[in-house]
Amino acid sequence: MDFDPFKKKIKDLNVLSATEGNVLVAEPFMQDDYFKRSVVFICENNEEGTVGFILNEKLNINLKDVLDQLTAFDAPLYMGGPVEAQSLFFIHKCAELDDALPVSEGIYWSGDFEQLKEFMLLGKVKENEIKFFLGYSGWDKQQLKDELENENWLIGKLESSIVFEHNAESLWRDSLKNMGKEQAIMANFPDNPSLN
């Protein structure tokens, strides 16, 4: 019997839409400097546009490097996208955080940061329940629609445990491998198409 827990956590990407809680998975030959082989978690999608965070672009700095008062909380930082790249953003599982915005079942984004710092210092939120980003990814409505029509992205859904805990280095490839045969083949395409 073939059992792969990751397969249970990725839904069929071809039947989903770019709504909150879903992910955009970059097609293999996208050469954009920010989005090449990225998996973007969508937090907001409305008439104004779409906001999300790149889940698999881990930076070489941690939260304690930018916030001295939280030295005990050693969470990694991720590059969330090219917009407002000097600002800190976060997604989390902390439903009781004031002003937190629900994204999907059990996942929220933003909220009262001073209260969050208290929660972290008191151990009310664990490192595997929150993810921090510098910057975010944003599209206006027509821009994302055009990119989807041009097949720049596949749309998928991940369970919260993968959103917060999966290995960033393998997330893009694992996502494709578990979507079906056609996408699994794409996961093995070389980083540089000219090397094929």
Image (tube, rainbow, N blue to C red):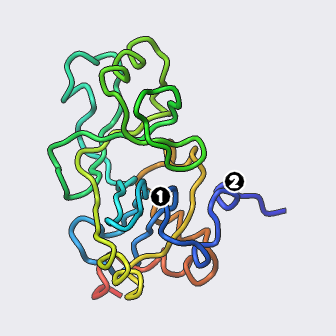
Q: Is residue 133 above or below residue 36?
A: above
Q: Quadrant of residue 158?
A: bottom right
> Relative to 107, is 32 on the left or the right?
left
Q: Which amino acid type corresponds to the residue marked 1 in the rendered image?
A: Leu
Q: Mark 1 sits on what residue?
A: 171
Between residues 46 and 174, which one lies in front from this camera angle? 46
> Which of the two discs, 2 and 1, labels the residue nearer the N terminus?
2
> Relative to 187, is 135 on the left or the right?
left
Residue 141: image location, x then y, percent: 33, 73
Which residue is drawn at the image coordinates 29% and 52% (left, top)?
80
Q: Is residue 74 above or below residue 4?
A: above
Mark 2 nearby-residue class (10 Å; few <14, some 14–19, many ≥20) = few
Which residue is drawn at the image coordinates 36% and 38% (left, top)?
110
Residue 161: image location, x then y, percent: 58, 44
Q: Quadrant of residue 14?
A: bottom right
Residue 19: image location, x then y, percent: 49, 64
Q: Which amino acid type corresponds to the residue marked 2 in the rendered image?
A: Pro
Q: Mark 2 sits on what residue?
A: 5
Outermost residue toward the top? 122
